[in-house]
Amino acid sequence: MNRYGQLVLDHNRRHRPAAYSQIPAPESFFAAVGEQIAEAVSRLRDEILGPIRQGESPEAYRLRGYQAWATAEELILAEHLLMQPEPDPTAETPEADDGDLEHRYRLLAEINQAINTPL
């Protein structure tokens, strides 16, 4: 298991215990997840880094590569589903998060009206 797999496994053990308990073979599951994350980080790093720039030294390109890797890793891990906290079943769901688009549009219209109404 690579370091991403271990990171996600540890996170799920600590912060998603209910979801973690539902995984039949956690070691192999998180090993596969770690490989997927490593591939995603590598692809995004390459996109961020791009080709060597005109006049750029190999050392500058290498340093830029490290920065691109750190950025890619941060973005991928922050967005990964298994790195999110487990939903709290006892927490109240705000009315605006119920999936009702019409309700959301009404709230936005009320906010817009309040902002544009002179005091």
Image: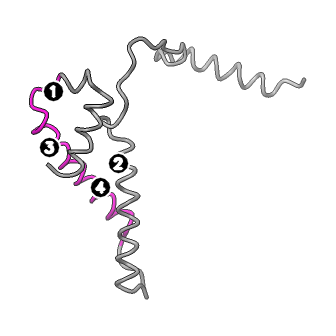
- Identify the residue under disc 3: 32
Instruction: Locate residue 28: give its quadrant.
Output: top left
Residue depth check, mark 4 versus mark 1: number of the one nearer the observer? 1
At mark 3, the secondary structure is helix
Range covered by the magenta-colored residues:
22-50
Residue depth check, mark 2 versus mark 1: number of the one nearer the observer? 1
Q: Position of residue 22 (x, y in %)?
A: 17, 22
Query: Quick one: 111 or 23, which is closer to the camera?
Result: 23
Amino acid residing under circle 2: Ile
Q: Measure how far apart labels 4 and 3 are at the Cα level.
A: 14 Å
- Relative vertical location of residue 10 with respect to residue 115 in this rendering, above or below: below
Amino acid residing under circle 1: Ile
Q: Position of residue 67 (x, y in %)?
A: 41, 66
Q: Is label 4 in contact with label 1 (beta carbons under 8 Å)? A: no
Other-residue count near label 1 (Cα within 10 Å), few / some / many at <14 / 14–19 / ≥20: few
Amino acid residing under circle 4: Val
For the C terminus, the quadrant is top right
The number of numbered discs placed on residues in the rendered structure image is 4
Amino acid residing under circle 3: Ala
Q: Measure how far apart labels 4 and 2 are at the Cα level.
A: 6 Å
At mark 4, the secondary structure is helix
Q: Residue at x 32, y 35 (%)?
A: 81
- Identify the residue under disc 2: 76
Residue 91 left/right relative to 115: left
Q: Measure how far apart labels 2 and 1 are at the Cα level.
A: 22 Å
Residue 86 left/right relative to 98: left
Tag shown at residue 41: 4
- Identify the residue under disc 1: 23
Q: Is label 4 in contact with label 2 (beta carbons under 8 Å)? A: yes
Q: Position of residue 8 (x, y in %)?
A: 26, 40
